[in-house]
Amino acid sequence: MKNLALKLTILILFCMINCSPLFHRQAEIVRIKGSDTMLILATRWAEEYMKLNPNVSVYVEGGGTEKGVAALIKGKADICAASRPLRAQEARLLAEKYRYIGISHLVAKDALSIYVHPENPVQNLSLTQLKQVFRGAITNWNQVGGNNDPILVLIRSPNSGTYLYFNEHVLEGEPYSKFAQVMPTTSAVVKTVAENKEAIGYGGIAYGITLKHCQIDEIAPTEENVRNDAYPIIRYLYLYTTNTPRGAVKSFIDWVLKDGQKTVTEVGYISLWKN
């Protein structure tokens, strides 16, 4: 009888464990890849969303907007984080595979900040001067009111959406200086500027809080100036999906567009509306 009772107890426990929906519910996974500019923001979003939704795992990876789009096209990412709109070629590849050109979700606003060392006396650059610096036409800080030091120009890698945006909107499609040093991430740009008084680089407003963010045409990259479009180098940040999101992906994006906007402000970017 004791053996029978023990067997019945084991059987009941086995049924309780295996029949319970708690043990059959598999964690849903959301894979995000793309913009290094958005990496700290997307990581914070993931952390906060998972606290509220423990049954969902959100994985975030950088690498640049271009790589994020490629991962989305290949089905290796559910969401591409992008610091620029899709290119025509990228939309065509999406359409060929999914019969959609991709769905864009505006999630934040960003100022493309120009970083210089805190001890650099230069406070302001005109858009024309900025273009000449990154084209290589201006090579010494004394040409723009600074010290008699050569300018160390830092740029992002070509797979970066920030690289492309700066090239299109500041250089007007003209090539970067052949002497510019390519940095793999925005964090690398910030680190190099912090270590070199002669350096200048660019990146998202949320990065480089210990550096000087130059005024452009005497307009500082502040929240107010970005929100009212006064600052001259402004862009939107996006989340892209292959088509209309569903399930956990939809739930995550819906949260980002609502409660996640508080995180946008906390990280240092500009939310879509005032919180």
Image (cartoon, rainbow, N blue to C red):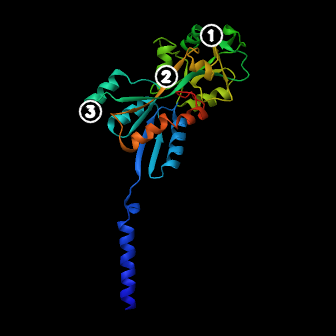
Asked which secondary structure carries label 3, the reply is helix
Q: Mark 3 points at which residue?
A: 97
Amino acid carrying label 3: it is Lys
- Secondary-structure class at tag 2: helix
> Upstream in the sequence, badge 3 or badge 2?
3
Residue 140 visible in this rendered orientation of the protein: no
Q: Which quadrant of the figure contains the N terminus?
A: bottom left
Residue 61 in the image, given as x and y percentages of width and height = 47, 39
- Whether residue 29 sits left or right of residue 112 in the image: it is left
Q: How far apart are marks 3 and 2 (CA)?
A: 27 Å
Q: Which quadrant: the C terminus? A: top right
Q: Which of marks 3 and 1 is nearer the N terminus?
A: 3
Which dot, 2 or 1, sits closer to the camera? 1
Q: Residue 67 occupies which quadrant of the picture?
A: top left
Q: In this view, does 69 lie above or below 219?
A: below
Are the residues at dot 3 and dot 1 in contact (C-beta closer than 8 Å)?
A: no
Residue 248: x %, y % from top left: 40, 44
Disc 2 marks a residue whose amino acid type is Tyr
Query: Dot 2, how many residues are within 10 Å of its Cα: few (below 14), some (14-19), or many (20+)?
Result: many
Query: Where is residue 200 drawn, in percent x and y?
Result: 62, 20
Q: Residue tagged by mark 2?
A: 163
The residues tagged by marks 3 and 1 sit, at their Cα atoms, a distance apart of 44 Å
Q: What residue type is labelled 1?
A: Asp
The x and y percentages for residue 76 are 36, 40
Q: In which quarter of the image is residue 196?
A: top right
Of the two numbered discs 3 and 2 in the rendering, the one whose residue sits closer to the viewer? 3
The residue that appears at 48% across and 31% down in the rendered structure is 35
Q: Is disc 3 surrounded by few (<14), some (14 to 19) or many (20+) residues within 10 Å?
A: few
Question: Is tag 2's residue or tag 1's residue first in the polypeptide sequence?
Answer: 2
Residue tagged by mark 1?
217
